[in-house]
Image: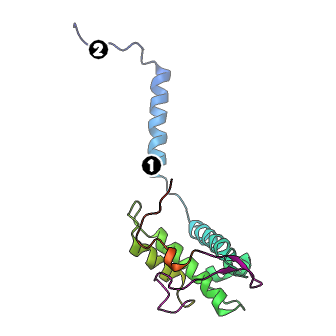
Amino acid sequence: MAGMYKPRFDISPELLRLVTLATEIRVWINSAVVDVSWLPILQRETAARLAHSSTAIEGNPLTLPEVVAIARGEEIGAKTTDKQEILNALAAMNWIWGRKPGAPIRESDHLHLHRILTRKTLSDEQSGHYKTRPNRIVNHRGITVYMPPPPDKALRGRKPCIP
């Protein structure tokens, strides 16, 4: 038969054995049940570490073990505002992680995220809105460590000019 494809190899018993073995292993992997009971614990601990580092740079005095306890739903003896900042950071991460991957991020999303992060720590007039007066970032001693741009210099719907 002219024109019929002829492979340049022979299907040896060893090759056939390896192909069969690969097929059996693939079926075994596809049918395997993966126990990920530890996953929620890992996610909670990761969220706690992120919340701790994110709020610590803003001056929150809670330690990592205290933040982990809050993430587990435990009560700790700390200032209400400090605990609320942690709860807000955890809620913000859950909101971000719950978004559809690749979904566009709109200005309203930024303001909503601000509302989540500042719940019960800022007034309703400030939470989820652009600032209207100057503010500053202070350390745990009350010393100013950063002065953000004043409200009249905010971007508000404009794209930043990046050279």
Return the residue nearer the eye: 77 or 9.
Answer: 77
**Distance from the alpha carbon under mark 1 to that under mark 2:** 33 Å
**What kind of secondary structure does the magenta stretch mostly adopt?**
loop
Q: Is residue 41 visible?
A: yes
Q: How far from the left and from the top, in percent, is residue 73? A: 61, 84
Task: Give the foreground label among 1 and 2.
Answer: 2
The residue that appears at 43% across and 73% down in the rendered structure is: 156
| Left or right of 29 in this view: 54 | right
Q: Residues within 10 Å of mark 1 (few under 14, many from 20)?
A: few
Q: Which mark is residue 5?
A: 2
Q: Secondary structure at mark 2?
A: loop
Q: Is residue 79 above or below residue 17?
A: below
Return the residue nearer the eye: 138 or 74.
Answer: 138
Q: Is residue 72 visible?
A: no
Q: Which mark is residue 30?
A: 1
Return the residue nearer the eye: 100 or 8.
Answer: 100
Tell me the kind of residue under disc 2.
Tyr
Q: Is residue 10 above or below residue 63?
A: above
Highlighted range, magenta: 122-148
